[in-house]
Image: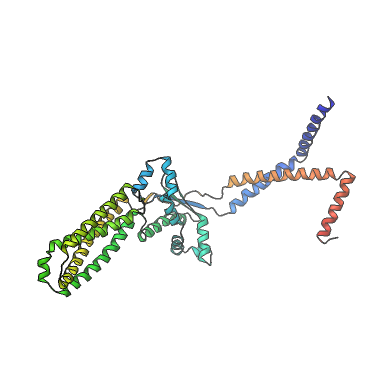
Amino acid sequence: MNQTTEPVEDDEINLLDLLQVIVDNLRLLVLAPLAAGLLALGITFAIAPTFTATTVFMPPQQQQSGAAAMLAGLGALGGLAGAATGIKNPNDQFVAFLKSDSIANALIDRFKLMERYKSQLKTDARRTLDGVSKIASGKDGLITVEVDDKDPVLAAQLANAYVEELGKMLNRLAITEAQQRRAFFEKQLLQTKDKRTVAEQALRASGVNSSALKSNPEAAIKAVAELQAQIAAQEVKLASMRGYLTEAAPDFKQAQTELAALRAQFAKAEKSSTPTGGADADYVARFRDVKYFETLFELFAKQFELAKVDEAREGAVIQVVDAAEPPERKSKPKKALIAVLTTLAMGMVLLLFVFIRTAWQGAAQTPETAEKMLRLRGAFAKALGRA
């Protein structure tokens, strides 16, 4: 029975010893943390308050493409498929724009932040601005911009300026699918217009050939040119569909079938309208070029107008939900939290110090341990060059 009771007695003695150590140093363990907490609280009053201004906005909404719509209909499986195919949340792109150097430089120049942050380099000013700015996209589809500053008015101005500079950037860039199509067809429209002008000049330079007009009526030449233009437009359509569809997709296969049918019609029409004479062939070829570029210009003009309508339908304008206003209350420093944390931290440090000091004093009472401590002190003194 003695073997079972002795460990319990040792444990009770150890716990009592620990409690005794705490009681013996109770004044230190209570008053010192309280003093540290009060000191930390007093220091917070000397720190300039920081204000946080917040603006919330909804980025431009994009219409779902065919592939994205199909993936959305699959639910959770669609989310996995979207991640595998590289389809990401468009809000992440707008957050990246807000964190870009272009917008940061614009804000630095606009509000003279290099002088305010006392930075000699714009890189340092960007780093400081990034440290006081928090940009995040929520699950509700809204983007939040928070800016900290000592001046509440400047904090609100910076938060709102982020949205303004994002709008300016979006006006320079083609982000959405409709914007990309509009930019593409606008470029094709200008190129086709120039080529049409060159073709018309070449036709006028060749003169009017009456025999060619009799053997190849304008209607037949126009039909061939229209088919050729439709083939070019269909090839452009196929090239754009490769960006979001695979070649096995039904829509892509149907577009390929339509392109093959147009090419077959063009081959037949070209054979029936090809002149035999050299002079006639030259005139007809130039006349056909004019009709080809005229038809192609009309097709691109229609696509350009459709893209503009889709772009307007997507809502390219940034919609601000909550504009930032100068905050009435400071966000930092949190005085009560700092005082409580300082008190608790000081209490833990002093408690550890008391236990270590007591253990050290207890170990020094035995001759063997005292000798070891003496040698340890001598080694420290020698290491410090005091021996």
Residue 232 sits in which quadrant? bottom left
Residue 24 image offset from top left, x and y in percent? 78, 39
Q: Nearer the viewer, residue 161 or 340?
A: 161
- Say which residue appears at 62% left-offset and 48% top-offset: 41
Relative to 90, 381 lies left or right: right
Q: Residue at x 74, y 40 (%)?
A: 26
- Residue 30 picture location, percent across and down: 71, 41
Quarter of the image that includes the C terminus: bottom right
Does residue 43 appear left or right of residue 271 in this picture? right
Q: Nearer the viewer, residue 139 or 307?
A: 307
The quarter of the picture where residue 301 lies is bottom left
Q: Residue furthest top?
A: 1
Location of residue 198 in the rendering, given as x and y in whole percent from the top left corner: 22, 71
Position of 112 with respect to 248 (left or right) is right
Q: In this orientation, does residue 236 appear?
A: yes
**Point 62% across, 46% down: residue:** 339
In this view, 345 is above or below 9: below
- Colouring chosen for the image of the structure: rainbow
* Figure quadrant of residue 31: top right
- The residue sitting at the right extreme is 367
The answer to whether residue 120 is above or below residue 331 is below
Q: Residue at 23% across / 56% down in the picture? A: 264
Q: Can residue 88 be seen in this snapshot?
A: no
Residue 360 percent across, percent down from the top left: 81, 45
Q: How many marks?
A: 0
Q: Nearer the viewer, residue 270 or 29?
A: 270
Query: Is 141 left or right of 307, judged from the image as shown?
Result: right
Image quadrant where one finds the N terminus: top right
